[in-house]
C-alpha cells in the first residue's frame, strides 16, 4: 500500500497542474466573453424597451396640445409599432440580417422622435407643461442610457470576436465550442458621417 502512495500523489499533482494550466490558458474565455456580450445585449434591449414604453405617453401629451401635428404623431406611432414588431432574441446578435432589421427599426424610431421634438418648438405652452417636461427629460435620459448600453455592447462584442479570431482562442473555440459564432455590432446610421445642415 505505501508503495503505491507516491504514484497516487504524483497523479493527483499532475491532475492539479493540468487543471491550473488549462484554467490559465484561457479555456473559459470564449464562454465567459460570450455571456458578457449576451448580458450587454440584454441591457441594450432593456433601454430600447424603456424608450418604447415612454413613446405612447409622449405622443398623448403632445396630441393634447398640437392636434394639427397628426402626421408627425402618426410617424412616431408607426415607427414605435415597427420597432416593437421586430422579434429579438439571443440569435439576433449572430444573424447579420436580423441585427440590421433591428437597428434600422430603432433608427427610424429615433428619427421620428427627433421630428416630434423639433415640432414641439412651435408650441410654447406645451414646452412649459410639467407632464411634457418630465417625459422629455426621461426620454433624453433614456437616449443617453441607450448610447452607453450600445457602447458597452460594442466593447464586449469586440473582446468576444477578437477571442474567436486570435490564437489560442480560435483553437479552443474550434475544439470545445464549435457553435460559437462572431456577434454583430452596431454601425453608424447612413449619412451620419456628414454634418447636419444648419439653416437660420
Image (cartoon, rainbow, N blue to C red):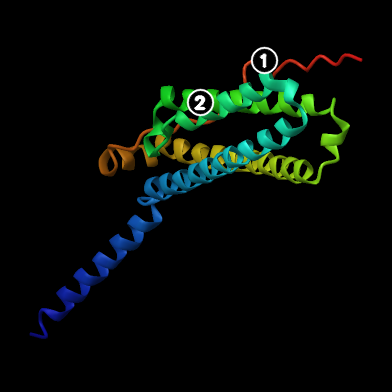
Q: Most extreme residue toward the left, as rendered?
A: 1
Q: Position of residue 45 (x, y in %)?
A: 51, 41
Q: Nearer the viewer, residue 139 or 8?
A: 139
Q: Is residue 29 above or below residue 190?
A: below
Q: Most extreme residue toward the right, as rendered?
A: 200
Q: Nearer the viewer, residue 101 or 117?
A: 117
The reply, left or right, for residue 7 in relation to residue 75 is: left
Say which element carries label 1. loop
Classed neighbour count for the residue bearing mark 2: other residues with Cα under 10 Å, few (<14), some (14–19), many (≥20): some
Residue at horizontal 11%, vertical 85%? 2
Q: Position of residue 23 (x, y in %)?
A: 36, 57
Q: Nearer the viewer, residue 136 or 12?
A: 136
Q: Is residue 188 visible?
A: no
Number of numbered labels in the structure image? 2
Instruction: Tell whether label 1 touches label 2 (CB within 8 Å).
Output: no
Q: Is residue 139 above or below residue 115?
A: below
Q: Position of residue 142 (x, y in %)?
A: 66, 43
Q: Is residue 127 visible?
A: yes
The reply, left or right, for residue 141 in relation to residue 43 is: right
Q: Position of residue 34 (x, y in %)?
A: 41, 44
The reply, left or right, for residue 65 in relation to residue 199 is: left
Classed neighbour count for the residue bearing mark 1: other residues with Cα under 10 Å, few (<14), some (14–19), many (≥20): few
* Whole-number angstrom distance, CA of label 2 to CA of label 1: 22 Å
Q: Is residue 100 above or below residue 178?
A: above
Indicate the quadrant containing the N terminus: top left, top right, bottom left or bottom right. Answer: bottom left
The reply, left or right, for residue 90 in relation to residue 44 is: left
Q: Which residue is mark 1?
A: 191
Identify the mark nearer the N-term, 2 or 1.
Answer: 2
Q: Most extreme residue toward the bottom, as rendered?
A: 2
Q: Nearer the viewer, mark 2 or mark 1?
A: 2
Indicate the quadrant containing the C terminus: top left, top right, bottom left or bottom right. Answer: top right
Q: Which mark is residue 82?
A: 2
Amino acid at each position: 500500500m505505501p508503495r503505491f502512495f507516491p504514484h497516487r500523489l504524483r497523479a493527483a499533482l499532475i491532475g492539479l497542474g493540468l487543471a491550473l494550466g488549462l484554467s490559465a490558458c484561457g479555456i473559459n474565455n470564449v464562454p465567459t466573453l460570450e455571456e458578457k456580450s449576451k448580458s450587454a445585449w440584454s441591457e441594450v434591449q432593456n433601454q430600447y424597451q424603456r424608450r418604447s414604453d415612454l413613446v405612447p405617453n409622449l405622443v398623448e401629451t403632445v396630441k393634447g396640445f398640437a392636434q394639427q401635428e397628426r402626421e408627425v404623431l402618426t410617424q412616431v406611432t408607426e415607427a414605435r409599432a415597427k420597432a416593437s414588431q421586430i422579434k429579438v432574441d439571443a440569435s439576433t446578435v449572430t444573424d447579420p440580417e436580423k441585427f440590421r432589421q433591428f437597428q434600422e427599426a430603432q433608427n427610424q424610431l429615433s428619427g421620428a422622435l427627433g421630428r416630434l421634438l423639433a415640432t414641439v418648438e412651435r408650441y410654447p405652452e406645451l414646452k412649459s407643461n410639467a407632464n411634457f417636461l418630465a417625459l422629455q427629460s426621461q426620454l433624453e435620459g433614456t437616449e443617453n442610457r441607450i448610447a452607453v448600453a450600445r457602447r458597452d455592447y460594442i466593447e464586449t462584442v469586440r473582446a468576444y470576436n477578437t477571442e474567436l479570431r486570435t490564437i489560442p482562442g480560435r483553437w479552443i473555440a474550434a475544439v470545445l465550442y464549435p457553435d460559437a459564432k462572431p456577434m454583430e455590432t452596431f454601425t453608424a446610421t447612413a449619412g451620419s458621417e456628414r454634418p447636419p445642415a444648419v439653416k437660420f
